[in-house]
């Protein structure tokens, strides 16, 4: 079996599939269930100096595999969370990572409390509600880093303005990055009642899960290209192939939230086991071999697309490619694939939709 253990900032992890700051880490009991489900590390729900007043309802599923939430940070007092909930989570015997927010003074206080209690192996801070100013990020990171003696990770949101400037400022302070937080604001509502599906003031919330996978991969790859510090990938993971994509984009590990909410806490261990099997099947001995592999193998950018070609042995004649071709370039005649190259614009949609991977674009990398 492939080796899926990893070491990040001197901390050893049995596998790279962790919980993420969110409802799955709302208290010690939930974190212990996640550990029982096979998580490689326990990232707790974000705490702040004052407990949140969370609206209801606060989580809905507007799209398959995705969540829209107005959850906010933990409702619990920070002292209870640190002294009781994080202390309980440590009983699992795996790394525990605290999550804190939001202003500099709050981060400094929470950092001192974490140091006093000694209940976390690392800490991440969220920039979700504190704007996009890189100089403010510097104040936040410094306030937390100066108050703890454990690794500090900066969790970035997709709405950040100048990513390169943010990384340049934070790199000298933090020990790593987490990307990304949920995307938004986002809105959904009932067309019969015209009422929002969330109980927040304006009905808006934050989107996570399958819908944001490409966005998350962009940020992981972009951050990894700007720094040698470890990047933890978050967003859109539904199956092992999504874990592999995060790792190949440059992530050293991944965090999972929405999938565990939708499918249960056992998903962490399943993803870890599936990752080991995937590595075996592709003849990799350890996860380090695939971390950043996409970036390393894209020196000349994307390949020039050619026309679709078919492996008829794999085709199940579902005709999805024919139906989805808005240019009407694809036809099946008596079970035979026919491509009208005068109509085909080489967009690639047919190949991406093929359930059997029977269609592929000829490419020219010269």
Image (spheres, rainbow, N blue to C red):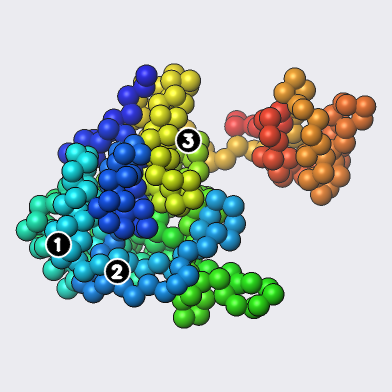
- How far apart marks 3 and 2 lie (CA) works out to 32 Å
State the residue lying farthest toward the left. Answer: 116
- How far apart marks 2 and 1 lie (CA) works out to 18 Å
Residue 75 image offset from top left, x and y in percent: 29, 69
Placement of 62 over or under 310, stated as above or below: below
Residue 124 image offset from top left, x and y in percent: 25, 56
Query: Is residue 298 visible to the viewer in this orientation of the structure?
Result: no
Residue 56 image offset from top left, x and y in percent: 45, 72
Residue at (69, 75) in percent of width and height: 192
148 sits to left or right of 166: left
Residue 231 image offset from top left, x and y in percent: 33, 46
Query: Is residue 106 visible to the viewer in this orientation of the structure?
Result: yes
Residue 188: name its quadrant: bottom right
User: What residue is pinned by disc 1?
Assistant: 111
Residue 63: name its quadrant: bottom right
User: What residue is pinned by disc 3?
Assistant: 240
- How far apart marks 3 and 1 lie (CA) works out to 34 Å
User: What residue is pinned by disc 2?
Assistant: 75
**Dot 1, how many residues are within 10 Å of its Cα: few (below 14), some (14-19), or many (20+)?**
many
Q: Earlier in the sequence, mark 2 or mark 1?
A: 2
Point out the frontmost of discs 2 and 1. Answer: 2
Secondary element at tag 1: helix
Secondary element at tag 2: loop
State the residue lying farthest toward the bottom. Answer: 201
Residue at (44, 45) in percent of width and height: 264
């Amino acid at each position: 079996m492939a080796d899926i253990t990893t070491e990040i900032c001197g901390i050893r992890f049995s596998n790279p599939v962790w919980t993420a700051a969110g409802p799955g880490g709302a208290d010690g009991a939930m974190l212990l269930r996640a550990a029982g489900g096979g998580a490689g590390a326990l990232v707790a729900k974000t705490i702040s100096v004052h407990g949140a007043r969370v609206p209801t309802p606060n989580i809905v599923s507007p799209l398959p595999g995705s969540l829209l939430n107005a959850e906010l940070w933990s409702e619990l007092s920070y002292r209870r969370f640190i002294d009781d909930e994080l202390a309980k989570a440590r009983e699992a015997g795996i790394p525990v990572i605290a999550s804190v927010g939001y202003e500099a003074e709050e981060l400094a206080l929470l950092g001192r409390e974490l140091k006093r209690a000694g209940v976390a192996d690392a800490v991440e801070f969220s920039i979700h509600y504190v704007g996009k100013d890189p100089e403010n990020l510097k104040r936040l990171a410094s306030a937390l880093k100066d108050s703890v003696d454990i690794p500090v990770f900066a969790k970035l949101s997709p709405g950040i303005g100048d990513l390169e400037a943010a990384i340049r400022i934070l790199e000298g302070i933090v020990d790593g990055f987490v990307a990304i937080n949920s995307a938004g604001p986002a809105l959904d509502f009932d067309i019969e009642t015209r009422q929002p599906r969330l109980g927040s003031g304006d009905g808006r919330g934050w989107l996570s899960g399958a819908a944001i996978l490409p966005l998350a991969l962009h940020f992981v790859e972009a951050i990894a290209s700007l720094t040698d510090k470890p990047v933890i990938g978050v967003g859109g993971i539904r199956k092992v192939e999504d874990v592999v994509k995060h790792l190949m984009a440059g992530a050293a590990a991944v965090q999972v939230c929405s999938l565990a909410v939708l499918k249960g806490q056992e998903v962490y261990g399943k993803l870890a086991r599936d990752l080991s099997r995937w590595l075996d099947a592709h003849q990799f001995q350890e996860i380090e071999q695939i971390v950043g592999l996409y970036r390393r193998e894209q020196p000349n950018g994307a390949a020039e697309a050619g026309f679709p070609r078919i492996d008829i042995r794999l085709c199940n004649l579902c005709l999805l490619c024919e139906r989805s071709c808005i240019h009407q370039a694809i036809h099946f005649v008596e079970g035979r694939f026919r491509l009208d190259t005068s109509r085909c614009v080489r967009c690639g949609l047919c190949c991406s939709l093929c359930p059997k991977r029977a269609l592929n674009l000829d490419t020219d990398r010269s």
